[in-house]
Structure formats: structure tokens, C-alpha cells
Image (cartoon, rainbow, N blue to C red):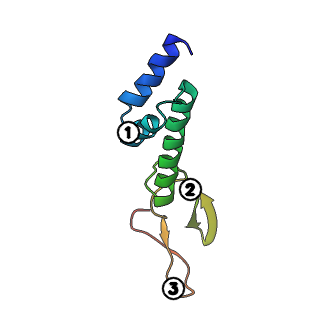
Amino acid sequence: MTETDKLIRNAIACKSLEERVRQRCLEKSKNLTLETAIDIGWIFEATRDGMQVMSGEDPRVEVNKLAWRNGSCQRSQKTGKPKTQIKESNEQPQKCDRC
């Protein structure tokens, strides 16, 4: 391992903003290589991102929704509330006040 690799490895292990990454690197301190330190960081980021997606906190996730327009249901990629509201009865959808 080159001196540069050691410096980068030590920076990840000691200066990471995430305590869990530092802790995991220190647990493997005798066998810690640059590749292992990078893998630990990637695993932590992937786990954190996955947890955010599962809890609905990740704003980068785009979810399709159904929006009612002209009495038919269409897929929409826009965010926000649907432009029409559906009553529980068999009546036609009514447009909201903002349309």
C-alpha cells in the first residue's frame, strides 16, 4: 500500500462525519485497507439512503401517482395534490377551486 493510500485510508477512518463509519473502520484497524475503508463508507451510505426511502424521507425518489382528469384516471409524474377530488358516491369528479 502506498503512502497516499494510507493517508486516504486514515482520513476516512478518522475524519469521517459519520461516527458509525469511524467506529467500523477502527474495529478493523489491523486489517484496514483503503478498499475496505471505501467499502465501509459506501455500505453506510447505501444503508442510510435505503432507510430514508423506506421511511419516505428521501426527496430524490420519484413516485408515480394517479390524477383524475376529465373523468378518467391518468398517470402523472408531477408532485402535489390531484387537481380534482372524487366523492365516494358515483358522481363525476368535481374540479377543485384552484383549477
Q: Which of marks 2 and 3 is nearer the N terminus?
A: 2
Q: Dot 3: within a 10 Å radius of its alpha carbon, few (fewer than 14), some, or many (20 or more) residues?
A: few
Q: Mark 1 points at which residue?
A: 18
Above or below residue 76? Residue 25 is: above
Residue 96 position, x and y percent, is: 43, 69
Above or below residue 19? Residue 71 is: below
Q: Mark 3 points at which residue?
A: 88
Residue 74 position, x and y percent, is: 63, 63
Residue in the picture at 49% in, 30% down = 30
Residue 65, picture quadrant: bottom right
Q: Name the residue under label 2.
A: 63
Q: Which of marks 1 and 2 is nearer the N terminus?
A: 1
Q: Which residue lies furthest to the front in this view?
A: 30
Can residue 44 be seen from the camera position used here?
A: yes
Q: Is residue 97 left or right of residue 74?
A: left
How far apart marks 1 and 3 lie (CA) works out to 49 Å
**Mark 1: which secondary structure?**
loop
Q: What residue type is labelled 2?
A: Val
Do tag 1 and tag 3 residues touch (Cβ < 8 Å)?
no
Do tag 2 and tag 3 residues touch (Cβ < 8 Å)?
no
Tag in front: 1 or 3: 1
Do tag 1 and tag 2 residues touch (Cβ < 8 Å)?
no
Residue in the picture at 49% in, 11% down = 3
Q: Is residue 17 left or right of residue 84?
A: left
Residue in the picture at 48% in, 18% down = 6
What number is the disc on residue 55? none
Q: Is residue 4 left or right of residue 71?
A: left
Q: Which amino acid does label 3 sit on?
A: Glu
Can residue 60 be seen from the camera position used here?
A: no
**Mark 2: which secondary structure?**
loop
Where's the C terminus, which quadrant?
bottom left
